[in-house]
Amino acid sequence: MTKITAAITAVGKYVPEYVLTNKELETLVDTNDEWITTRTGIKERRILKEEGKGTSFLAIKAAEDLLQKSNLNPEEIDMVIVATATPDLMVAATAAYVATEIGAVNAFSYDLQAACSSFLYGMSTASSYIESGRYKKVLLIGADKMSSILDYTDRATCIIFGDGAGAALFEPNTEGLGLQDEYLRSDGVGREFLKIEAGGSIMPPTEETVKNRRHFIQQEGRTVFKYAVSNMADVSEKILNRNNLTKNDVDWLVPHQANNRIIEATANRVGLESEKVMVNIHKYGNTTSATLPLLLADYEKVLKKGDNLIFAAFGGGFTWGAIYLKWAYNS
Ligand code: UT7
């Protein structure tokens, strides 16, 4: 029997129109363009400004871009996963609304939350459904409206994040393309260092929690940075070794876009020249669940069938990992 692998067969993206520049951030907090550029690599990020629009708005737009480019009939989609840390509502899956709005009326859908590793973990979930033969078309969307959980008086966080969404369709492949291997990890020690304290079951919302700004994301940047650098580099090296790949076999590193210095450290560890590293952090900042699919959409034109891609991500929780995937089409 031919082995079924799970391949990405189409991608789509959406970023909101509003551009929040480093210059504008200088008017909100005590920071400057030079610090942000040298410490993170970010020049600007996109913000969804319209009131009443949540993460589903971004996710729907990215899915519609994919549908339009691929000519896919949404009724053929079996399931929709929305990877997100900023769901529309605390209860009621954003994915269910997204699926209905895009016309995926035969799909079931749910959200997946693993902070900045949400899309990476979602790739594993989507692929498992395909490899098992249970479903034929799984739409994975990474979407986050980070501006909804940012404190624009906190310079440690508000300069980093942006809003955006990307989508990828997973389908069965019999040529051996698609997901080859994964190495996914988590460690609960990390939840102290990157979190939203209030609004969950430990600390439900009160007047106090709102007054004390505890519904915003907080991070101990330096600590997260150290863990991110060592773990993203470790898993990338591990997945190469485990699959007997040398740096020459790798066509692209697809790293989570949290900080240019983390991206460079990961690339250096596996000896990859910068031409093989996907980067768009300067345009969008850290869009959490959307960084990886936004990279795929931005680089789609230069990707070739058979290219070896190494995905790596690190996020709150802590959660992190790497995935080895063979690209399945020329665009
Ligand atoms: O995606 C999920 C995972 N998240 C990450 O991977 C983020 C990881 N962390 C980082 O990327 C970095 O830690 C940050 C970009 C958040 C911060 O960069 P850093 O080089 O670690 O800075 P730091 O926190 O060590 O601060 C260095 C200095 C401090 O001043 P002193 O104490 O040396 O005088 C900060 O107060 O920079 C100061 N600083 C700023 N200055 C201007 C901190 N934030 C800013 C700012 N503008 N926005």
Image (tube, grey):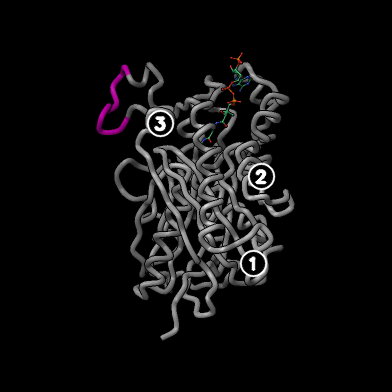
Relative to 330, does residue 162 appear above or below in the rendering? above
The range drawn in magenta is 199-208
Dot 1 or dot 2, earlier in sequence: 2
Relative to 34, does residue 321 appear above or below in the rendering? below
Residue identifier under label 3: 195
Q: Is residue 63 visible?
A: no
Residue identifier under label 1: 307
| Quarter of the picture holding the C terminus | bottom right
User: Which label belongs to residue 240?
Assistant: none
Q: Which amino acid does label 2 sit on?
A: Asn
**Left or right: 93 with respect to 53?**
left
Q: How crowded is mark 1: few (under 14 residues within 10 Å), some or many (20 or more)?
A: some
Q: Which amino acid does label 1 sit on?
A: Asp
Q: In which quarter of the image is residue 212?
A: top left
Q: Is mark 3 on a helix, strand or loop?
A: strand
In 3D space, how far apart are the residues under numbered discs 3 and 1 (Cα atoms)? 36 Å
Q: Does the residue labelled 2 lie within 8 Å of ligand 1?
A: no
Residue identifier under label 2: 268
Q: Is mark 1 on a helix, strand or loop?
A: loop
Relative to 145, does residue 326 appear above or below in the rendering? below
Q: What element carries label 2?
A: helix
